[in-house]
Amino acid sequence: RCLHGYEADVDEIVLTASGGPFLGKSRDELGAVSIGDVLDHPTWRMGRKVTVDSATLVNKGLEVIEAHWLFGFPYDRISVVVHPQSIVHALVRLRDGSFIAHLAPPDMRLPILGAFRYPAIVDFPWKSLALDEIGRLEFLPVLKEYPAFELTLETARAGGTAPAVLNAADEVAVDAFLRGRIGFLEIVDWLEEALGAHRTAAVRKIEDVLAADRWTRDFLAARHAGAVTD
């Protein structure tokens, strides 16, 4: 929506992240969080897997990759800010320095509806946004408390089979966490293990991606026998 009609004038795409349930928490505090704590998102109601990804910010790293491929923007022209209120869902910065923002209630039904009917604007039958009830809108930098986010961006820039490895490792690690077999902080450890052991190769066909995905699942299953469900 923000890009529509302005594609030639956009300098930067800005994605927003809520920060998840642990915004401002220290690493020591994160080491003691439970599955219930992770799934208790302050603004969004989503599936279990994506809610965990919101807590690690892997989801936002994957959205950067999506924006890169969908809109053809280089990674250095896509940024992310933490926006705890989850009201501003994306912005574009134009070459004159001004911003265009998309504001809407934090309700997944709206983007799903928009995806089905784009570019048409259709009636939203649920509660709409009331500007006088918002209060304030905050925008904060992504801090080091989200190492999985930076790892995802590094993987994106590496390209080739690396993003497929990260995505598969995240699926395996999050599943293990939700089954109570690993702690929250171990998720990023598993991502680093898989990426560190994988030899990134160019992607020439879809089979290269599927092979990288399979390699990752087999690697983590062998390395963490008993914690991984195939």
Image (cartoon, grey):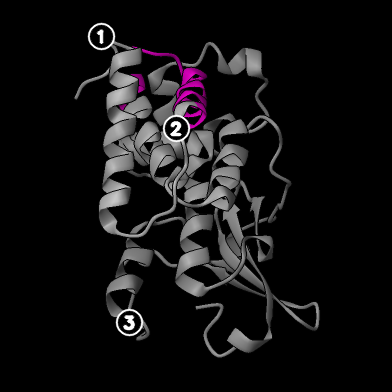
For marks 2 and 3, give the one nearer the viewer: 2
Q: CA distance from mark 2 to mark 3?
A: 46 Å
Q: Amino acid at mark 1?
A: Gly
Residue 87 found in image quarter: bottom right
Q: Residues within 10 Å of mark 3 (few under 14, many from 20)?
A: few
The magenta region covers 175-196
Which of the two discs, 1 and 3, labels the residue nearer the N terminus?
3
Q: Position of residue 100 (x, y in %)?
A: 65, 76
Give the residue at x 59% y 55%.
16
**Circle 2 residue:** 198
Q: Tell me the SS state at disc 3.
A: loop
Give the CA distance from mark 1 to mark 3: 49 Å
Residue 129 visible here:
no
Point out the residue furthest to the right here. 97
Asked if residue 151 is positioned above or below residue 89 in the image, the reply reads above
Residue to which mark 1 is pinned:
226
Q: Nearer the viewer, mark 1 or mark 2?
A: 2
Is residue 123 rendered magenta in the image? no
Q: Relative to residue 172, is residue 1 depicted above or below?
A: below
Specify the label residue 122 is tagged with.
3
Marked residue nearer the N-terminal end (2 or 3): 3
Which residue occupies 37% across, 25% down? 173
